[in-house]
Amino acid sequence: MKKILTLIISLLIFASVSCSSGNTTSEPDTSEKDNARIVKIATVVPDAELSYYVNQYNSANDKYKIELVNYDRGQDHEENVKALKMDIVSGNAPDIIPFNADMPIDTFGSKESIFVDLYSMIDSDPDLSREDFVDGFLEGMESNGKLLMITPSFSIKTIECKDKFLNGLTSWNYDQMMESYSKISENIDLSAESKYGSSTSAFCEIINYNSFIDYDKGVCDFDNENFIKLIKFFKDNDIGSVDSSGWDSDMIRDHYKNDVLMLNVTEVQYFLELYAIEREYFNEPTTIIGYPTENGSVSYVEIDDGYSILANSDVKDGAWDFLKYSFFSDSYYTGTTGSYLFPAVDKYIDEQAENVNKLLSDAQKEGEDAAPMSDEELKEYKTWVRESAKNVVKRDQNVMSVLWDELNAYFNDERSAEETAKMIQNRVSIYISERYT
């Protein structure tokens, strides 16, 4: 089983790299520029995948041509991001803006006037509609009811655990997670980070900080009883390594099989990974239990990046045409790197699952131990993907930095749990009230 799964994943990765790294950004011919309108896209770091799509689009279109505007000006990365931010606010930025966790779109105070509501582009598009997307996915990316950023694909963050450690649980809250681990903690580490990483990294890996923040209202709740109880639990149980040693993926898989680790905290990108959970990672009955919250489990989509169109662009239709052509068509989901992430366009979820099953079927015919997924498994996995896609959160690296600073201080015995929670509450509260409201 390990052999065939490794082979298939290697083939997928090779196909992805081949599509994206074999091309570099090229300027359109002068004759093409004379007859085409130019759409500009900002970049802060080199992006081989984006360059690939730009070249594909430019080769196939005459009405618009895409140019990349590089903000990597040989200075510190934060300075590059700051330069792009200044151009966005002043209205002098390129037509299309890529966003990520270092520059969340929701931190722009006047974002509704700065960026196009992409619902207007979708609603006027003859080939694409809101109903074409996975249910709840677009709504999860909204800012005050408007779609200011869009991304074509997603992965799902979740946690898996052997059934024997869950005592019948299929969902859990904070207390149930702590109780489940307490019963076995003398013989097993909580996760890979708790064995090989710091207490702070172990905590941030398992506790989803977004459950303590309401970005829409610009408020947070880190100084509550649950958060304080959680950080005390991690400290009291020595969850986290002081002197970490080297490890690799094969070692971690063996740890799961041999009950050295309780939880597999993972980011599922593809149906093949779901297929491999029980068969390769755990080798016995396993449940996708999800992240604990106050009210139960959640598996969620964390949006790291996406694309926006500036409202003052005079080529908004061309900008949308590029995004639609490159990221929401058959070529993205079936022929390039987009094939190896869950698709935002719903119809491709079924296609992707069937393609994985065909790979497994072909491998089985070659004598490998790779039985295709049953109809019941396929239905279960597709349902899980679609349900998880409704739980969209946006990642903000600035909030993560605050958590790391203050939690490190707590785990290093520099302050109490209550003081730590208060410090995090004050810092994050000020930040989100200034940037998100």
Image: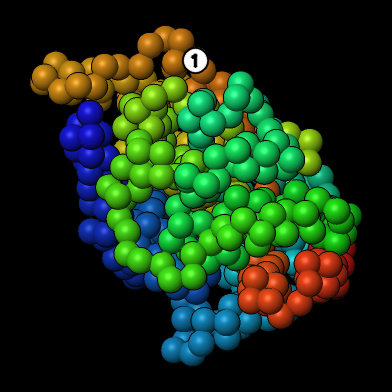
Category of crowding for the residue at label 1, using alpha-carbon neighbours closer than 10 angstroms: few (below 14), some (14–19), many (at least 20): few
Looking at the rendering, in which quadrant would you find the N terminus? top left
Q: Quadrant of residue 339?
A: top left
Report x, y in % for residue 39: 52, 63
Q: Quadrant of residue 436?
A: bottom right
Number of numbered markers:
1
Q: Does 202 appear above or below 129? A: below
In the rendered structure, the answer to whether residue 82 lies left or right of residue 273 reads: right
In the rendered structure, the answer to whether residue 36 lies left or right of residue 225 reads: left
Question: Of residues 267 and 114, which is closer to you in this image?
Answer: 267
Q: Residue furthest left?
A: 366
Question: Of residues 74 and 293, which is closer to you in this image?
Answer: 293
Residue at the disc numbered 1: 379
Q: Residue furthest front?
A: 186
Task: Using the rendered image of the protein, determine whether residue 138 is visible from the camera's viewpoint.
Answer: no
Report x, y in % for residue 294: 78, 41
Q: Please, what secondary structure does the residue beneath circle 1 have?
A: helix
Q: How is the image coloured?
A: rainbow
The three-letter amino acid code for the residue at tag 1 is: Lys
Task: Using the rendered image of the protein, determine whether residue 354 is visible from the camera's viewpoint.
Answer: yes
Q: Does 332 appear above or below 193? A: above
Q: Does 285 appear above or below 431? A: above
Measuring 78% from the left and 67% from the top, which residue is drawn there?
Answer: 417
Measuring 52% from the left and 47% from the top, which residue is drawn there?
Answer: 186
Report x, y in % for residue 134: 60, 30
Measuring 53% from the left and 61% from the top, which residue is drawn there?
Answer: 240
Q: Residue furthest top?
A: 375
Question: Of residues 235 and 10, which is closer to you in this image?
Answer: 235
Measuring 81% from the left and 45% from the top, which residue is drawn there?
Answer: 145
Looking at the rendering, in which quadrant would you find the C terminus? bottom right
Question: Of residues 297 and 391, which is closer to you in this image?
Answer: 297
